[in-house]
Structures are given as C-alpha cells and as structure tokens.
Image (cartoon, helix red, strand yellow):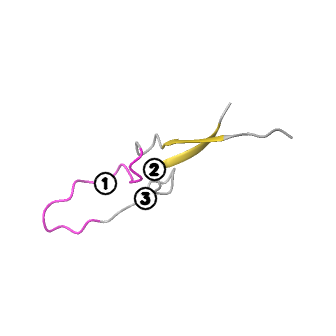
Amino acid sequence: MTDQKEIERNCPECDGTGQDRGMHPVRLGEKHEFRPCTKCGGSGKIKEAAD
C-alpha cells in the first residue's frame, strides 16, 4: 500500500471564490443569494492526489 499525499488548490471552476459563476453583480437594494460552486461545494478549494 502506498501513502499518497493530497494537495489543496483553488477550484478551477470558481477560481477559489466558492461561488457559482452564474451569479450576477448585486445592485443596491437587491437580495444577495449565495449559490455554492458545484465542483468544490462552496469551499473554493479542491483536493488532488500529489504525484
């Protein structure tokens, strides 16, 4: 059994913001609804196996 290490990097889908790219800028007086990124689940980070 090999011991694989994981590295954490910014999610390429949301550029590390954790927000869905389809979000529009909020205007004054509008309700802001946070929609998490579907790839990272809103954390902005993904784990990958290090080589």
Q: Total label count?
A: 3
Labels 2 & 3 near each other (Cβ < 8 A): no
**Magenta stretch: residue 7 in it?**
no
Say which of marks 1 and 2 sits in front: 2
* Residue 51 spot, x, y in % from top left: 68, 30
Q: Secondary structure at mark 2?
A: loop
Residue at the disc numbered 2: 44
Precedes in sequence: disc 2 or disc 3: 3
- Residue that carries the numbered disc 3 in the rendered image: 36
25 to 5, vertically: above or below: below
Residue 38 coordinates in the image, percent (x, y):
49, 54
Please state the extent of the stretch shown in magenta in the rendering: 16-32
Q: Which numbered marker is on residue 23?
A: 1
Q: Rounded to the nearest whole Å, what is the CA distance between mark 1 and mark 2? A: 15 Å
Q: Residue at x 74, y 39 (%)?
A: 4
Are there few (<14), some (14-19), or many (20+) residues within 10 Å of tag 2?
Answer: many
Specify the amino acid type for callout 2: Gly
